[in-house]
Image (cartoon, rainbow, N blue to C red):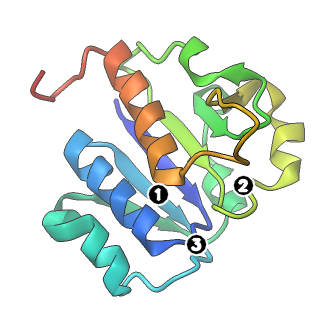
Amino acid sequence: MSLHIVLHEPEIPANTGNIARTSAGTGTFLHLIHPLGFSTEDRMLKRAGCDYWPHVLIKHHESLDAFLADKKRENLYFVETTGSMPYSSCDYRDVTQDYYFIFGKETKGLPANIAKAYPERCIRLPQNDQVRSLNLSNAVAVVVYEALQQQSFPGLRY
């Protein structure tokens, strides 16, 4: 099936543009959960995504609740600094499954109720205490490439 990058209320257009480029280059779907902190016509968003926008498989959602309404719990991974396990300890090898990696907004992360509702689905990227969190576009790339590596990079030049 597919890998899905889900951005909950992203705020920085350059991050979303960089993530769109990763999405286009890996064939992963990009889901944007509104409200966005910028216009999709923003020149920084377009510049960061360069000329790859026509290749981005993108879907917009009105809210996180609307997005989650029809998703299977076992296919959701909420990426948060307070996650209960490292992203690399999860098994993403089943290529017949969809995997959704949900990332929070740059300044606040995911809503607090998510960790309470999905404690076993919260994953993290290891880091030291010198920063609050890693850059969103970097974190997305790390997680997506871990899943792709486990699946032997399907459909990609290797």
Residue that numbered label 3 is attached to:
11
Label 2: how many residues lie within 10 Å, few (<14), some (14-19) or many (20+)? some
Q: Amino acid at mark 2?
A: Gly
Of circles 2 and 1, the one toward us is: 2
Q: Amino acid at mark 1?
A: His
Please, what secondary structure does the residue beneath circle 3 have? Answer: loop
Q: Is residue 35 above or below residue 77?
A: below
User: Which of disc 3 and disc 1 is earlier in sequence?
Assistant: 3
Please, what secondary structure does the residue beneath circle 2 have? Answer: loop
Q: Is residue 62 above or below residue 72?
A: below
Please, which residue is most extreme toward the front here? 130
Label 3: how many residues lie within 10 Å, few (<14), some (14-19) or many (20+)? some
- Residue at 72% over, 58% down: 65
User: Which of disc 2 and disc 3 is earlier in sequence?
Assistant: 3
Q: Relative to 117, is 25 on the left or the right? A: left
Q: Are marks 1 and 3 in contact (CB under 8 Å)?
A: no
Residue that numbered label 2 is attached to:
109
The CA span between labels 3 and 2 is 11 Å
Q: Are marks 2 and 1 in contact (CB under 8 Å)?
A: no
Quadrant in the rendering for residue 96: top left
- Residue at 60% over, 41% down: 71
- Residue at 62% over, 77% down: 35
* Numbered badge on residue 31: 1
Question: Where does the image place residue 107, in percent across and percent down from the top left?
Answer: 70, 64
Question: Where does the image place residue 6, in percent across and percent down from the top left?
Answer: 52, 51
